[in-house]
Amino acid sequence: MERKIVLITGATSGFGWATAIKFAEHNYNVIITGRRQERLEELEQIIKNTYEVNVLTLQFDIRKKEEVNSAIGSIPHAWKNIDVLVNNAGLALGLSTIQEGDINDWEIMIDTNIKGLLYISRGIMPGMVERNSGHIINIGSVAGKEAYGKGNVYCATKFAVDALTKSMRIDLLPHNIKVTSICPGLAETEFSLVRFKGDAERAKVPYANFEALTAEDIADVVYFTASRPAHVCLNDIVITPTAQANAHDSFRKPVDNSK
């Protein structure tokens, strides 16, 4: 039986990395994309050495439309029938009030989280429409369900992902294409390290005294979503750690200072 093909953006770490491995484990041929060539090569070797599937790497910056279009245009004919697109690439930068926000950070978040998702989707969707099949899985966030203090522009970009997912679902409905939004809560990946621009100590704070989600937890949900029967579409999934109720409320274990 011919293997299905999944394309995953932002595969160089975190959710994207774990999701690529999860789909390879389930016998998908995998297209991995990202900016860091050395990380793509490392992931490619891990998959090839562990699973009997094929891997195609595409190195580009999803914020740059010309690079996205060139990468999509370079996909070999044997890889063009993409069954699942996982729009995972995204980031948060900074944690400040909106009146003190860094405009450069805003532009990077908007270009990555919204425009990048649109660029890659626009390149892949016509093929799905032509084949009358496909599944687009957008990685959103609980920050796209409710805003939180100092989240402002990051929250806005994830609200946009939520709206785009709903719009895609409507527009692609006549073409038998599934569209899903998966919205994680606190997950311990490179997310905070990127948000705080490499400040490792500050990046630890969100996860202190708290059992966060892992990248593998999200990968499990992404694959589960993609593996449902043809007539079943999971439209919108919010996943948090047990100790987190929403974007605002979480329970952290009390620190025992007596020792």
Image: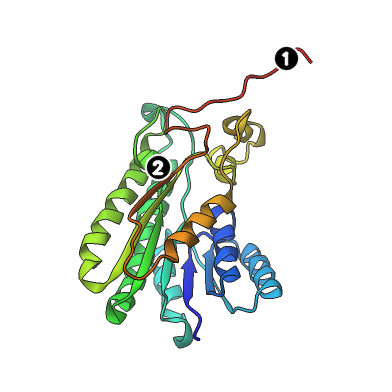
Residue 201 spot, x, y in % from top left: 66, 32
Residue 94 spot, x, y in % from top left: 49, 36
How is this picture coloured? Answer: rainbow
Q: Nearer the viewer, mark 1 or mark 2?
A: 1
Check residue 212 in the rendering and tell me which mark sits there, or answer none. Answer: none
Can you say whether 180 is above or below 56 in the image?
above
Task: Name the residue type under label 2.
Answer: Trp
Q: Please state if 94 lies on the left or on the right of 54 as rendered.
A: left
What's the residue at 38%, 59% (across, down)? 117
Can you say whether 96 is above or below 226 in the image?
above
Residue 194 spot, x, y in % from top left: 56, 44
The residue under label 1 is 257
Return the residue found at the far right.
259
Q: Please state if 169 lies on the left or on the right of 147 as rendered.
A: left
Q: Secondary structure at mark 1?
A: loop
Task: Name the residue type under label 1.
Answer: Asn
The residue under label 2 is 106
Return the residue found at the far top.
258
Tell me the distance, in whole angstroms, between the alpha carbons under discs 1 and 2: 39 Å
What's the residue at 34%, 35% (across, down)? 146
Can you say whether 31 is above or below 167 in the image?
below
